[in-house]
Image (tube, rainbow, N blue to C red):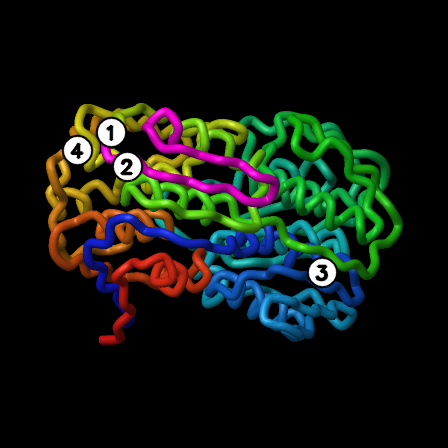
Amino acid sequence: MDKFLVNKSMNLKGKVRVSGAKNAALPILAASILAGDEVILEDVPRLRDIEIMEDILTTLGADFEFIEENKLRIDTSRVENKDIGYELTSQMRASTLIMGPLLARFGNAKISLPGGCTIGTRPIDLHLKGFRALGVDCDVHNGYIEAHSEGLVGQKIYLDFPSVGATENIIMAATLAEGETILDNAAMEPEIVDLSNFLNKMGADVKGAGTPTIRIKGVEKLGKASHQIIPDRIEAGTFMVAAAMTDGDIELENIITSHIKPVIAKLKEMGATVEENGSHIRVKGTSEPKATDIKTMPHPGFPTDMQAQFMAFMNIIDGTSVVIETIFENRFRIVDEFKRMGADIKIDGRTAIVQGVEELTGSEVKATDLRAGAALILAGLVAEGETIVDDIYHIDRGYENIEEKFKALGANIKRVSV
């Protein structure tokens, strides 16, 4: 099993190109089922989660080929409706995203209940509620979700919570439904806009993505398309925090700045300098950062996936910072790992009170989930001594070549196999 060895590395400097967004690529890969033809995707990150989705689609009969490093050709013309078992779904929450496309194309889906990062319960109730509204019979038996429909019919659907996964699944299912589906209180994340743009390129009729109300008019057939995946806003945010907390100077390429407004605002609040220039952004740190408070919210609020990275920064800022987590109940599992490094953090329900310390010290820590793993690397960059980050398979699920990108900025980080 691999580990990262991280040593103190202040004043990181240089340029980083941000990879394509994992959370955009995964639903788009699932949506390729709807094409029944060839699709070409550019800027697909080479990540473990992408490999798992590839395994799922290959099991169904899809043909995959990376024709360039990050350019993927998928042919789903020979896809068949097969059961997807626990061996595949247990590795990734996003495996549920194949349900919408399978229901739209075949009228049936059977998939084992999914796994993924243990950051909260993330029930699939909203997915099933949406499917049922479209005319699907859904049941959970012996650890499997079984869904069947004689024909999907558009309806008006209200989500009790703006779930990203449920929004994506319902949109994909509705693309081939009879009539119009109106989805209210939909999630508004940029990844949903990217999925909708891809679906429309295949011939779908999806309007309103990025707003709380999305309208999907069913069409008879979808077909081939080419599409470039949007940049990963969470990877971008991670390197922006790295610049700020190491008092560094990092320029990021391949950015959509409107996707990271909350991150930009908070870093400025904390004393960093942020310069925006088209698809580039430059972040310069400060020797006297300021404490701040954050509250995670659905987009366009502060992203839950950036909470741990900001907490890593807060640990070394003089003063008291407060983090309120409203999305996932287990996002604070990382706190015990920060404490092993000397952090002073108190938890009260979904609130973390962070009292900055003079310094963190290197320790052996575990990545409790994907974003926690990235946050521990950040903490290791400012800690005295060596930090050993274990369970980095979580990090590999969501960050492409993270150690190489950090090394290019001057970081002392090494991957070792044990």
Mark 3 Cα shell of 10 Å, populated few (<14), some (14-19), many (≥20):
many
Q: Is residue 128 visible?
A: no
Residue at 69%, 35% in the rendered image: 209
Mark 4 lies on residue: 345
Mark 2 Cα shell of 10 Å, populated few (<14), some (14-19), many (≥20):
many
Q: Is residue 410 above or below residue 196?
A: below
Mark 1 lies on residue: 352
Q: Which mark is residue 400?
A: none
How far apart marks 4 and 3 lie (CA) works out to 46 Å
Mark 2 lies on residue: 311
In terms of depth relative to the viewer, which is nearer, 156 or 383? 383
Q: Earlier in the sequence, mark 3 or mark 2?
A: 3
Q: Quadrant of residue 80?
A: bottom right
Q: Is residue 343 visible?
A: yes
Assess whether mark 2 and mark 4 are in contact (beta carbons under 8 angstroms).
yes
Q: Quadrant of residue 208?
A: top right
Query: Which amino acid type corresponds to the residue marked 3 in the rendered image?
Result: Ile
User: Quarter holding the C terminus?
Assistant: bottom left
Q: Earlier in the sequence, mark 4 or mark 3?
A: 3
Assess whether mark 2 and mark 1 are in contact (beta carbons under 8 angstroms).
yes
User: Quarter holding the N terminus?
Assistant: bottom left
Specify the segment rendered in magenta.
267-289
Mark 3 lies on residue: 33
